[in-house]
Image: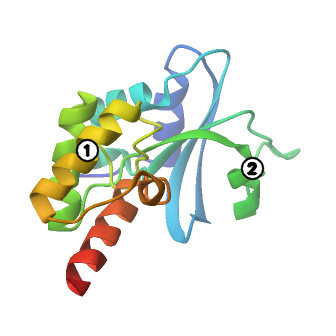
Amino acid sequence: MTDSLTVEECESLLRGFDDVADAAVVRTAWRGRDLRIGAVAATGFCDVVGIRDAVRERCGDGSGLDLLALVDRIDRDAAGRVAFDDPAGIERAVLSTASLESTETPTEAALARMWCEALKRDFVGAGDDFLDLGGDSLAITDLLLRVRQEWGVPIEYHEFADVTELRQLARFLDAARAVA
């Protein structure tokens, strides 16, 4: 599917998942990027990464979403419009996220393959966080070893703690290799 879903189609799709009480699609500047975010409020435990994977399976790249965000609630005004009009509002509401953004650089693509193997996932988005996807200390140790073998860049645990998002780690690696 190449055409993006409409806002209403995305919201309907997201509301169709078990344990989703409400869903809204908002376009906002978030963490320095202009994103179309699918916000999901849950009735109980909600696996936002599992929902992301199911959305990708159903829609491919055609969902039109850049990010899924698990939020504690979705506030609406009297007309029913979502009240995430300020970027800080959605930032405060986000409990967990799952990226639907594809990789853009060769480093991002190679890291995504490594992450998929390490985390036993079919897809990892450029905006995904290694820890949010279930990466633990053993997976981090393995990843840092593989990064050193692949690119010759040693990364310490404390450095990795600052670049746990795939895109951030790719930029860190590219910058470190440019200096070397």
Q: Dot 1: what SS?
A: helix
Of the numbered discs 2 and 1, the one sitting upstream in the chain is 2
Residue at the farthest bottom position:
179
- Left or right, 66 with respect to 175, comes to right
Give, as a three-letter code, the residue at label 1: Leu
User: If the image is split into quadrants, where does the N terminus sit?
Assistant: top left
Give, as a three-letter code, the residue at label 2: Arg
Give the residue drawn at x 74%, y 38%: 74
Q: Which one is in front, 116 or 20?
A: 116
Residue 58 % position (x, y): 28, 30
Question: Is residue 79 positioned above or below 135 on the image?
Answer: below
Question: Is residue 162 positioned above or below 143 on the image?
Answer: below
Residue at the farthest left position:
150
Give the residue drawn at x 43%, y 52%: 164
State the mark number for residue 1. none
Q: Which one is in front, 14 or 68?
A: 68
Give the residue drawn at x 28%, y 76%: 176
Residue 160 % position (x, y): 41, 55
Quarter location, residue 153: bottom left
Display colour scheme: rainbow
Mark 2 to mark 1 CA distance (whole Å): 30 Å
Q: Mark 2 points at which residue?
A: 92
Q: Dot 2: what SS?
A: helix
Q: Which one is in front, 65 or 1?
A: 65
State the mark number for residue 143. 1
- Left or right, 150 with respect to 65, comes to left
- Left or right, 112 with respect to 84, comes to left
Give the residue drawn at x 34%, y 70%: 172
Residue 161 % position (x, y): 48, 53
